[in-house]
Image (cartoon, rainbow, N blue to C red):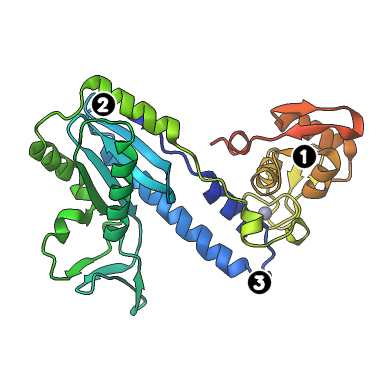
Amino acid sequence: MIIQPLIIPKYILQTEALERRLPPYHPKKGILENKARSLRAGYNGELALDFPLSFLLDEQYLIFYYLRLSDASGSFQMDTLILSTNFMLIIEAKNMKDHVIYNDMGQTIRIENEKEQAYTNPVDQVNLQHLRLLRWIRQFKFPTIPIEKIVVYTNPKMLLKNQSNDKSLSEKVMHKEKILSKIDEFAATHTSKCLTENQLMELSYQLTSAHTPKEEKVMEKYDVYFEELRKGVICPKCKSMPMRWHKAKWFCEHCHKVSKTAHKHALSDYALLISDYINNRQARELLQLESLYVAKRLLQKECVEQFGVKSGRKYKLDFRKLLNE
Ligand SMILES: [Zn+2]
């Protein structure tokens, strides 16, 4: 049973919004492009796990995606956590197209265009999550429950090589096709019940209550100001901008695409990067509209709430609703 469903985290959408809104010549453009690409690839890796995990028995396993807990050292996020009465399982998903080698120095090397590059060993990463989860659970005085962890590569075409002396590595690192048989293996190993059904529910409740989604001030993080962002409605087809408002529709002068809803993406970019609240003047600047009346009509249609009167009126935006997420 999925307790905490897989929805795309806000900080990924924020990074993508900032990348989209930076002009091509901006000095941060390249960094943002790489960051947005790698975050989206990571999320796609999670999506790829969603299907095999949907075969797990609802009454036996509780699934949590992107659970983020706080502890004395800060906070830690587990991509996927599976909970049962007999054991817990942390899954670290990796979605990459490059080949990966685990070497005898405990390093992970990815090979991209015949160039080798070391990056954080995901096994170390998942071991640390294990330690922190264990410490986190201890505060509730639940009976001890084994915690397993695996690293799963979701792209079936990439090669995984073990050049380390650790022959047990293949028990911890695998392609996603092995995931269900691995979970069966854990279930066969951990035959004794550590938690009652009630304790399982209690632990599940504690985990979801403690979950704090990552909040990021992405503009501050990359030191970008509103004035530097590209304004206007982006064409959903050819990505050029700005689209022109003409006869109650958005029109792309580049590819001639016509859209009635293209402003929704611009408004969600505003909510993700600047504020959940927008007024008429700000909306006209954002959408590159001259008409006060058109801006008002669009805002009234897309907002979730309005406050104030006349020129002081503010409209509340919900980026998930605007993006239909
Ligand atoms: Zn276009």
Q: Which residue is mark 2?
A: 58
Kindly indicate whether the residue at mark 2 contacts the one at mark 1 (C-beta within 8 angstroms): no
Which one is nearer the viewer's eye here, 261 or 33?
Answer: 33
Amino acid type indicated by mark 3: Pro
Q: Which residue is mark 3?
A: 27
Q: Which mark is residue 96?
A: none
Q: Which residue is mark 1?
A: 278
Look at 17% across and 30% down and name the residue there: 194
Q: Quadrant of the N terminus?
A: top left
Alpha carbon distance from label 2 to label 3: 49 Å
Relative to 211, residue 130 above or below: below
Amino acid type indicated by mark 1: Ile
Mark 1 and mark 2 lie on one chain; the one further toward the N terminus is 2
Q: Could you tell me residue 2's position as x and y percent?
A: 34, 30
Circle 3 packing at 10 Å, graded few (<14), some (14-19), many (20+), is few
Furthest toward the bottom, the residue is 115
